[in-house]
Image (spheres, coloured by chain):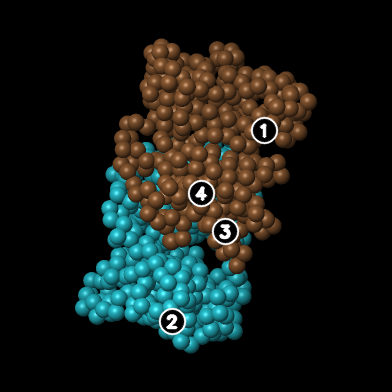
Chain colours: A cyan, B brown
């Protein structure tokens, strides 16, 4: 009975908010029937992603709203990584029996807020009880032209490698939450920002559109650290990606946290993960294109050139570090 | 690293089998990129569904293959309940650290086999570790015409209510697994069949197509027991559904198990749930149509008329039982 009440409350949350406008447009039937009915387009781009308490986050370290935000943002980020605009999301919640009803609703509201901000609609959901708090989100985007999507497999020798925003902030925020690093090394504002980077990532849809306009040949979101994710690009494209660790852009405070952890700041930024920035391969003309187009620069935000693409057997190398070491190098993630 | 190996093994399973043929047709990009890319159609019909160990099943009671089968079949059943043919499935596995790799693959293989049998393709997946074995499946079907779908809200006064197949078998199978009932009361073949009813349900796609051909006005799959599911039809359609408990078709052995449990066999069949049969409202002319069409009868299998639709305030009533009692009546499910 409690489950039924929760389902009804969750459905009320899903039925509210600006998402309603999108629903009126594309969603013919939302939550409440056996399945949602959504007007389609040429191609559906779909990804399923799970966050598990104790593995991808610890419920004691994050608020319910932060968990909901993070689950939705990380799922949507997979669509950004295809350069695909978001359409609908479907959220399956597994809640421990002791979960407060308000927490469940806060979680769903925060997930819905992320969707609203990026033009997505939560069109369906499922609520179960479980010993382990688990949030699974399926996201769907639509594209009339699959050639406009950017996979992991299009990088060509001669391309340049770039990354959006800055890296390491989420990992540093987690190190602070874990108590592996102490906030004393950074100022209060920087510490709060590192927490936000971990707890409230935002999928980079606008940056993805700009990267597509620049002719990006391969694209991935930086969920496991660029040392792992760039390796996926190399492997799937059958090329060598050669990066320079010291060139990786780092969030404010990352150097101090890395120093506390006694690891190289570049290695930390390359491997801490959870940043949900985008790593792209771009044709050699891209920097010139970008320099000439202020609108693209504004949409993209900071972009840093971190390496280049060579002929090679699907490998990641560094000009200034050891790829083999970085392969197994993770900072406290499950 | 173990997670990565498992993901690769799971992807190999997903890449094999007859699903490949469907993939070549509709799936442009399958597992291995940030998201799957699937050729769409007019409308996407989508449902997300989670099975949690200890809540929806107990891993000690079922094999890994049975868990995978059941997770996929119960998710696909939501598409059957819309009279929608299945397209793609996306499966998110949360596996306890002690899970044998073979078990994970058996689970996915069994889920894939269910898909193959019903013309669906697993187009994406996610593998995580978790303390609690959890399987979330998102299923998508495609329809050029949303009017051809059957929701829960179309029942009209004067309609008849019917149910496919037989009920109570899954609940009786679970009672045997739980040791709440003993197999001694039924013969060995019946006991095995009751177990199969619980562990290996099949979504009723062919029956759903036949019900649509008969003009079904409202449709739901019997996942929580017809006493609960028919109530959803009544509430969403704004009508009264009036059923006769004693007319509910019962699987062989259900009467004996109900007697052991000291509950009325009709009440047991109405409330034990997990049967994944279909409950439909049909226009008054449907029995005559069905009598005249051998092909429809063959597609539909056994169909039992169990009640009728009256003007009313969205309520479920019984000619021979107490709806209020049945509302909270569940047999050992979480």
Q: Give the CA distance from mark 2 to mark 1.
A: 57 Å
Q: Residues within 10 Å of mark 1 (few under 14, many from 20)?
A: many
Q: Which quadrant is the N terminus of chain B positioned in?
A: bottom right
- Tell me which residue sits at (28%, 56%) in the image: A145
The chain containing the residue under callout 1 comes to: B
Q: Going by the image, does A323 lie left or right of B267? A: left
Q: Quadrant of residue A204?
A: bottom left
The chain containing the residue under callout 3 comes to: B
Q: Residues within 10 Å of mark 2 (few under 14, many from 20)?
A: many
Where is mark 2, residue-wise? A243
Q: Earlier in the sequence, mark 3 or mark 1?
A: 3
Q: Give the CA distance from mark 1 to mark 4.
A: 27 Å
Q: Give the CA distance from mark 3 to mark 1.
A: 29 Å
Residue lying at the far bottom in this picture: please name it: A320
Depth check, front residue: A69 or A318: A318
Q: Are marks 2 and 1 in contact (CB under 8 Å)?
A: no
Q: Give the CA distance from mark 4 to mark 3.
A: 14 Å
- Tell me which residue sits at (53%, 84%) in the image: A322
Q: Residues within 10 Å of mark 3 (few under 14, many from 20)?
A: some
Tell me if residue A191 can be seen. no
Q: Are marks 3 and 1 in contact (CB under 8 Å)?
A: no
Where is mark 4, residue-wise? B17
Coordinates of residue A176 in the picture (x, y in percent): 57, 73
Where is mark 3, residue-wise? B9
Q: Between tags 4 and 3, which lies in front? A: 4
Q: Quadrant of residue B183?
A: top right
Q: Give the CA distance from mark 4 to mark 2.
A: 39 Å
The chain containing the residue under callout 4 comes to: B
């Amino acid at each position: 009975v409690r489950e039924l009440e929760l389902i009804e409350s969750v459905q009320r949350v899903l039925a509210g908010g600006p998402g309603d406008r999108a629903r009126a447009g594309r969603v013919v039937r939302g939550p409440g029937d056996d399945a949602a009915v959504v007007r389609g387009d040429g191609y559906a781009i779909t990804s399923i992603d799970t966050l598990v308490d104790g593995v991808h986050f610890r419920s004691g370290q994050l608020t319910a709203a932060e968990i909901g935000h993070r689950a939705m943002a990380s799922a949507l980020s997979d669509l950004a990584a295809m350069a695909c605009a978001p359409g609908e999301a479907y959220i399956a919640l597994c809640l421990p029996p002791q979960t407060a009803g308000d927490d469940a609703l806060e979680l769903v509201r925060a997930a819905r807020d992320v969707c609203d901000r990026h033009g997505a609609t939560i069109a369906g959901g499922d609520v179960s009880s479980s010993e382990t708090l688990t949030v699974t989100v399926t996201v769907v985007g639509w594209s009339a032209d699959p050639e406009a999507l950017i996979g992991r497999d299009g990088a060509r020798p001669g391309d340049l490698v770039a990354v959006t925003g800055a890296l390491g902030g989420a990992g540093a925020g987690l190190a602070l939450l874990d108590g592996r690093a102490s906030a004393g090394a950074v100022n209060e504002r920087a510490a709060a920002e590192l927490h936000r980077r971990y707890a409230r990532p935002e999928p980079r849809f606008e940056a993805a559109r700009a990267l597509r306009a620049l002719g990006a040949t391969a694209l991935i979101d930086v969920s496991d650290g660029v040392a792992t994710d760039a390796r996926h690009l190399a492997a799937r494209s059958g090329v060598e990606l050669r990066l320079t660790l010291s060139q990786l852009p780092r969030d404010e405070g990352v150097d101090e946290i890395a120093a506390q952890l006694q690891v190289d700041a570049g290695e930390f930024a390359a491997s801490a993960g959870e940043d949900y920035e985008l790593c792209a391969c771009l044709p050699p003309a891209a920097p010139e294109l970008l320099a000439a187009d202020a609108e693209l620069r504004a949409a993209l935000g900071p972009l840093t050139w971190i390496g280049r693409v060579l002929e090679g057997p699907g490998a990641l190398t560094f000009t200034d570090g050891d790829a083999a070491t970085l392969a197994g190098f993770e900072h406290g993630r499950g």
